[in-house]
């Protein structure tokens, strides 16, 4: 199933929303339970206590009205007793009907039973009293058992116990509400953090599914910009994969164009070499005056011709090397080499040019390990770097060359006090045919291939080259190489101490 970026984001948002809805629903459910518990407590137990208090008050009144009636046999007191008894019975029945606890239900049933017995006894006494009154038997003995009044303390005690049980139920309900609230708060906190974690995980997953392929495309395009036309592999099935396919198609087209260009460059270089060799041979024959004498002007022109032929041959060779490098056909003959002796040879070759321009070259060195290198190509690297330093350094300037150990390998730094390189030009100086914007200020002319070859030759041999510069204050180029593994290779170059002495002689 192809999930577009839009669908991924919507799916993530919907998932987070669904989780939030579930969390909120749970919290509402828990709050509803707490609310119901509180409602039950307030509507049942609190009401029961209030009713029990009212019943207890009516019991006191009923006891007094019954006592007064039994003493005076006044029907007014009996009517008061009868009315209070009816209301008390109704309240008892109402209180019994809302009870859910067995113990409290039994207490109220006992109160109701004993109250009914007392009420029946008083009513029986009232009936008997009327009958004797009709017979005018005023001296009839009372039939009411005064021991019935002893049930009132029992009833009061039962009501007090009922209220204590109801209060205990309220306390327990409140404790349960508090416990439920605390548990709900903890669960809500856990769910909130869990939801946040899930949301962050989903956001990270969605972000990675979007940014990871984009990063792969970025790395691929950077490699394409550096001349490596590999295929970008993207596993996502969204718009990024379509972008990767388009970039891969572009990469294939650029690779084909680059191959055609490299082939054309090689062909042009080869085609130029033959006529250049012919011109060079003719120039040599004429300059040696093998076909007759020449005047000084003619010899000067032939010398100028030779210089331009050399420049053209040098450019052709550099052009051909670039073509080989871009086609991946450059070969390196790596041998155990002494880096210091290679640098010393390049400095010695440049001394004449430096003295002619009035530039001083200072060399310092310390013991370094051997490296694996193509000596010829590495000599070309340092020749280019030293000649560039001389070219862009004014008279009485200084070029400082330092050869020293760097990490587990060796580093050669070439620092000059020349015109420097602008910060916007510095990242592009190793690009072929590129020249810094201030190069024309010293009247220097070049092809823009020297530093491109330096970078290609150094990296092709496992090294690295970097440049730093301050406009108007000079530049520093550093070339780093890893140390050779002497455990598997036999030394084939002079000792490092000898190289140290040669460097001291140059300094």
Image: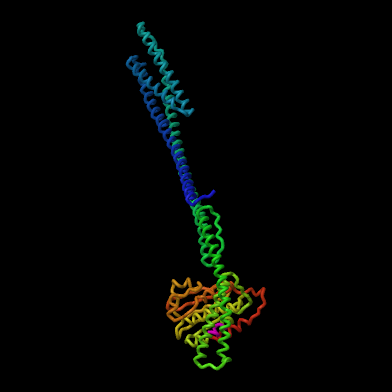
The percent coordinates of residue 448 (x first, y second) are 50, 75
Using residue 400 as the reference point, say whether residue 483 is left or right of it: right
The percent coordinates of residue 190 (x first, y second) are 48, 47
Q: Choose between 325 and 82: the one closer to the eye.
A: 325
Using residue 362 as the reference point, say whether residue 50 is left or right of it: left
Which residue sits furthest front? Answer: 291
Please tell me whether the stretch drawn in magenta is mainly helix, strand or loop.
helix
For residue 281, say whether it is visible.
yes
Q: Choose between 102 and 388: the one closer to the eye.
A: 388
- Which residue occupies 38% across, 29% down? 50
Q: Vertically, is 51 above or below 314? A: above
Q: Choose between 5 and 33: the one closer to the eye.
A: 5
Q: Vertically, is 331 above or below 160? A: below
Q: Choose between 325 and 106: the one closer to the eye.
A: 325
The answer to whether residue 23 is magenta is no
- Which residue occupies 42% across, 78% down? 472
Q: Vertically, is 72 above or below 182? A: above
Task: Look at the image and give the residue range highlighted in magenta.
Answer: 345-350
């Amino acid at each position: 199933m192809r999930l577009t970026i839009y669908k991924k984001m919507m799916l993530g948002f919907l998932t987070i929303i669904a989780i939030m809805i579930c969390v909120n629903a749970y919290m509402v459910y828990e709050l509803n339970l707490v609310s119901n518990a509180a409602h039950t407590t307030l509507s049942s137990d609190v009401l029961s206590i209030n009713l029990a208090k009212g019943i207890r008050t009516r019991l006191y009144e009923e006891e007094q009205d019954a006592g007064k009636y039994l003493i005076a046999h006044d029907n007014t007191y009996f009517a008061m007793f009868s009315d209070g008894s009816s209301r008390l019975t109704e309240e008892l029945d109402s209180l019994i009907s809302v009870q859910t606890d067995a113990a409290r239900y039994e207490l109220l049933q006992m109160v109701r039973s004993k109250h009914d017995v007392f009420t029946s006894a008083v009513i029986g006494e009232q009936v008997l009293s009327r009958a004797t009154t009709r017979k005018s038997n005023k001296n009839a003995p009372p039939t009411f058992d005064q021991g019935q009044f002893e049930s009132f303390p029992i009833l009061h005690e039962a009501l007090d116990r009922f209220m204590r049980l109801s209060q205990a139920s309220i306390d327990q309900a409140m404790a349960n509400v508090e416990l439920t609230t605390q548990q709900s708060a903890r669960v809500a906190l856990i769910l909130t953090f869990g939801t946040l974690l899930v949301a962050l995980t989903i956001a990270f997953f969605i972000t990675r599914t979007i940014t990871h392929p984009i990063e792969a495309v970025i790395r691929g395009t950077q490699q394409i910009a550096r001349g490596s036309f590999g295929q970008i592999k993207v596993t996502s099935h969204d718009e990024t994969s379509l972008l990767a396919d388009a970039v891969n198609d572009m990469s294939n087209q650029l690779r084909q164009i680059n191959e055609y260009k490299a082939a054309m460059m090689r062909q042009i270089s080869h085609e130029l070499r033959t006529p250049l060799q012919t011109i060079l041979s003719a120039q040599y024959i004429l300059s040696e005056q093998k076909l007759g004498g020449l005047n000084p002007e003619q010899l000067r022109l032939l010398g100028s011709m030779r210089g331009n032929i050399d420049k053209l041959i040098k450019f052709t060779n550099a052009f051909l090397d670039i073509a080989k490098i871009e086609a991946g056909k450059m070969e390196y003959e790596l041998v155990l080499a002494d880096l210091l002796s290679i640098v010393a040879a390049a400095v010695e070759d440049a001394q004449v040019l430096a003295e002619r321009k009035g530039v001083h070259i200072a060399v310092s060195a310390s013991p370094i390990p051997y490296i694996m290198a193509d000596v010829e190509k590495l000599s070309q690297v340092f020749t280019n770097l030293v000649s560039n330093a001389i070219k862009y350094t004014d008279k009485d300037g200084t070029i400082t060359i330092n050869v020293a150990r760097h990490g587990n390998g060796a580093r050669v730094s070439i620092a000059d006090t020349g015109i420097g390189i602008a910060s916007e030009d510095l990242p592009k100086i190793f690009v072929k045919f590129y020249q810094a914007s201030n190069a024309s200020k010293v009247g220097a002319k070049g092809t823009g291939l020297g530093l491109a070859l330096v970078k290609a030759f150094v990296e092709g041999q496992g090294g690295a080259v970097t440049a730093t510069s301050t406009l108007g204050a000079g530049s520093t180029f550093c070339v780093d190489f890893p140390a050779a593994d002497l455990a598997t290779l036999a030394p084939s170059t002079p000792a490092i101490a000898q190289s140290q002495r040669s460097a001291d002689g140059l300094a």
